[in-house]
Image (cartoon, helix red, strand yellow):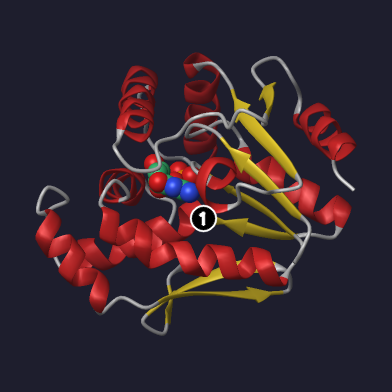
Amino acid sequence: MGYNVAVDGPAGAGKSTIAKLVAKEKGYIYVDTGAMYRGLAIHFLKKGISPEDKEAVAKACIDADVSIVYENGVQQVYLNGENITGMLRTEEVGNMASKTSAIPAVREKLLELQKTLAREKDVIMDGRDIGTNILPNADVKIYLTASVETRAKRRYDELASKGESCDFDEIARDIKERDERDMTREIAPLKKAEDAILVDSSDMTIDEVVSKICSFCN
Ligand code: DC
């Protein structure tokens, strides 16, 4: 059994930025489970399937092979043999992943992949249901959050720095909708595990959050 750190929290809380840095500091492998849901979302988008058509989504899971490899310590996501890592982080893919991740067949498809990675390696794994569902016996559980305004501002700055046009109110609205969907779905909703440590990063720097989390880890 590997040493397991679970990090859950809403979209834009900084989970992946923080988890990557903790992984580097502690020598763990960083497992981004959102990227796996995004990988499947790309499969559904390519097939032109509506996220409302649950049967079609479940059926499409059968011919989707999502796999993870690590190249120079960086997670790469493959969909049916194609490296799709560069396509994962768009709003369209994120929204599709948020909608389709509520469908049981989608979660079942990724459950074993996530559990196996944690069994075999020392990992810091981020997502929505890691501490509550995937790794209930994780050595450390963190619930990382931040206010909607802070998260929207971070997303706005990220898009603006890439020269992409964006609207703050639209981003904030999108984040609230995504929170609502991720927290109220029937299976494996986003919630803080009872034994998770709550970290609110609204008024903290990245370095402060990383050192706080590292202080709880071996
Ligand atoms: O963390 P992210 O934004 O890359 O995740 C995209 C979507 O995938 C998110 O809105 C909900 C879903 N997800 C999930 O249901 N369970 C996880 N463990 C990780 C992500």
Please give the name of the residue rendered at 27% of the width and 68% of the height, measured from the top-left corner: 43
Q: Nearer the viewer, residue 149 or 127?
A: 127
42 vs 98: above or below: below
Residue 77 image position (x, y, % from top left): 49, 70
Is 196 placed left or right of 52 in the picture?
right
List the residue tagged with mark 1: 33
Please give the name of the residue rendered at 38% of the width and 28% of the height, measured from the top-left corner: 179
Please give the name of the residue rendered at 60% of the width and 51% of the height, measured from the top-left corner: 135
Residue 106 image position (x, y, % from top left): 31, 59
Identify the residue at the far bottom of this view: 81
Is 14 placed left or right of 153 in the picture?
right
Mark 1 C-beta to ligand 1 under 8 Å = yes
Q: Which amino acid type is shown beneath numbered disc 1? A: Thr
In which image quadrant can residue 169 be found?
top left
Is 60 placed left or right of 30 in the picture?
left
176 vs 91: above or below: above
Q: Nearer the viewer, residue 161 or 204?
A: 204
- Residue 41, visible in the rendered structure: no
- Callout 1 environment at 10 Å: few (<14), some (14 to 19), or many (20+)? many
Secondary structure of residue under mark 1: helix
Position of the N terminus by quadrant: bottom right
Residue 71 image position (x, y, % from top left): 67, 76
